[in-house]
Image: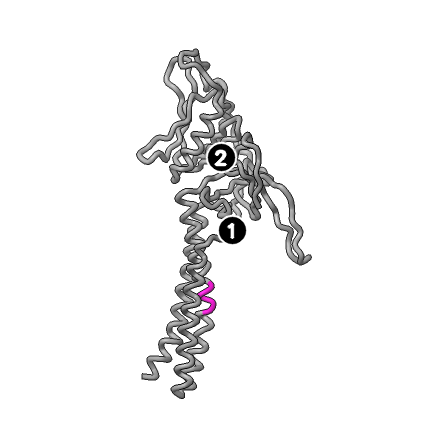
Amino acid sequence: MTSEVSAAEQPELVLRGGGVTARFDGDDVHVSEGHERRRIPVAAIEEVRAAGPQGSTAEIVLTTAGGPATVHSVTHHNSRAVTAFAAAVNAAIPPRDAHEPREDGTALVEVTSTKSRPARDDAKPAEEATAAEAAGGIVFLLVALGWLTGLVWLLVDGEGGQALRWGLGFLPFLIGGGALYGFVSELDKGLALRRRGITVVAVFDRKEEPADSEQSAVTVYRFTDLKGVVHDYRGSGRKVEGDARRVEITYDPDHPDVVSGTGWYARLTGITALGLLTLALLAGALYLTVGSVVDVF
């Protein structure tokens, strides 16, 4: 579900990498590293610039009264997300004359410790589907057609025992085809979010009661994309400062319905496990089906 909002409403952007997290809520940049959290008001920021060979490092440069400027950096795997973060913060910095005296930005930074806070949870969300799932569906249809052709051929040839073996082989093909369908879809979404995903904060909106009373209620969050459009997200994610009503999610700006609340490595683990399951099922199916044809000859 999406809805248009005013241009003034902006997403709460997040960058994460190398043990550092930077989050911009529209007024302040919150930088967390280890057990320290810094709240940096935009008035204390001179600029945010994209640095590094591929522009994958966001450098938050504080104002200075004349000495060397303090710089807080966070390196993210996605330069597109870094560019969006820098643009959002720079647009919020109050206009200044180039020769206007600056206040020391470090004096405006609030530093707190998070040692007493509980560890944040990473929960696996439900992710939206993409058109790439069609690839898995096409493969499954081709497999089903091949199985039906082989079964008819064995029955016509009078090979009842081998036909039974061939027929039983369709069960792991059926399950393996479904697993392949899911594997292709999850791999496509995972790679898309890795290449160009934007991480923002989603805010709790409501609970949806399921039609089946035995099922749990679905938590619905809302987030705003870079175009100012509000989307619903059903799932969970990394809590923001321990607040379960605010979670970090990553979405694909080219396809905002592709959303995940898990990090890349968690997604990669799930994709790998699904891929191994697919290989095992398809190998078993090939043994039953192809083996039955080889025995005929």
In which quadrant will I find the C terminus? bottom left
- Residue 256: percent from left, percent from top: 49, 44
Circle 2 packing at 10 Å, graded few (<14), some (14-19), many (20+), is: many
Point out the stretch of residues depicted in magenta.
Answer: 174-178
Of the pair 260 and 122, the residue shown nearer to us: 260
* Residue at x 54% of width, y 37% of height: 240
Q: Which residue is mark 1?
A: 128
Of the pair 168 and 156, the residue shown nearer to us: 156
In whole angstroms, how far apart are the C-alphas of marks 2 and 1?
20 Å
Say what amino acid the circle numbered 2 marks.
Leu
Q: Secondary structure at mark 2?
A: strand
Of the pair 195 and 34, the residue shown nearer to us: 195
Circle 1 packing at 10 Å, graded few (<14), some (14-19), many (20+), is: some
Q: Is residue 186 above or below residue 250?
A: below
- Residue 289: percent from left, percent from top: 39, 76
Q: Secondary structure at mark 1?
A: loop
* Magenta run includes residue 152: no
* Residue at x 38% of width, y 37% of height: 79
Question: Colour scheme of this structure image?
Answer: one colour
- Residue 270: percent from left, percent from top: 45, 54
Q: Which residue is mark 2?
A: 13
